[in-house]
Image (tube, rainbow, N blue to C red):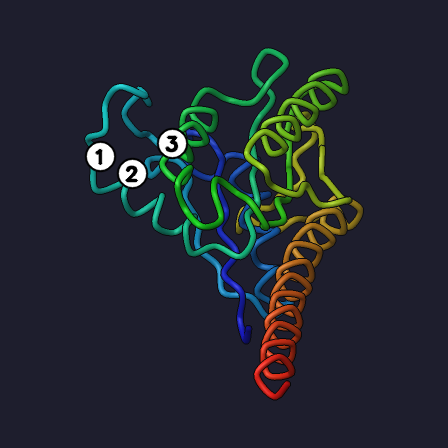
Amino acid sequence: MSRPLIVGVGGTTRQNSSSELALRAALRHARAAGAETAIFTGAELNLPMYGAEDDSRTGAVTRYIEALRRADGVILASPGYHGSISGLLKNALDYIEDLRDDAAPYLDGRAVGCIVSAYGAQAMGTTLSAMRSIVHALRGWPTPMAAAFSAVTPVFDADGQCVDPAVDRQFRMIGEQVVEFAHMRANHRAGASDLAAAASLKVACG
């Protein structure tokens, strides 16, 4: 694997919300670590309400699901809405059911970074816990580092750059950990393939 694809998902319907800027910051760090990135936020996530009985898909849903299908890692970002993730993000995550029959179903084998922006410590904790639980349910691997920061004090300047070194360090660690895990996973698969080929050759040679 030369450049893993890391897909960012989240934000709000408001352009340049704190959660969207946080997601973009983490993806910048992922690119600095050698990844290719894609992002789905705001209007791109304003998708039709997911329904298990309806298999019709808009072009926006298809583009989003295909990006996740190719992803080697994922970063999620959400504001804390009433103690949990936003409905916008939850609806987008429900569409991952479309990946259930893939060779790597749902988010299986992918590291997932989690970022939460909220106005209070309780909302940060409950929202982050909910996000991690959803990632587990989707068979993803939450990264050891997660980011939760207060939206009370602005941490981004007018250009969308993080001006709080401690918060930006969280974003950097998430971006780097998702990329590192993607490389580790690829190396593991390559090693397992080499071992299987060696075993087959040994059997064939008697």
Tell me the SS state at disc 2. helix
Name the residue nearer the viewer: 203 or 155. Answer: 203
Which residue is drawn at the image coordinates 72% and 49% (left, top)?
168
Left or right of 76 on screen, residue 169: right
Q: Kindly indicate whether the residue at mark 3 contacts the one at mark 2 (C-beta within 8 angstroms).
A: yes
Query: Which quadrant does the N terminus fall into?
Result: bottom right
Counting from the top left corner in percent of width and height, residue 138 is at 55, 34
Q: Kindly indicate whether the residue at mark 3 contacts the one at mark 1 (C-beta within 8 angstroms).
A: no
Which residue is drawn at the image coordinates 19% and 30% (left, top)?
56
Q: CA distance from mark 1 to mark 2?
A: 6 Å
First-in-chain label (2 vs 3): 2
Q: Which disc number belongs to residue 95?
A: 3
Of badges 2 and 3, the one in the foreground is 3
Figure quadrant of residue 62 = top left
Left or right of 43 on screen, residue 74: right
Tell me the SS state at disc 3. helix
Counting from the top left corner in percent of width and height, residue 169 is at 76, 51
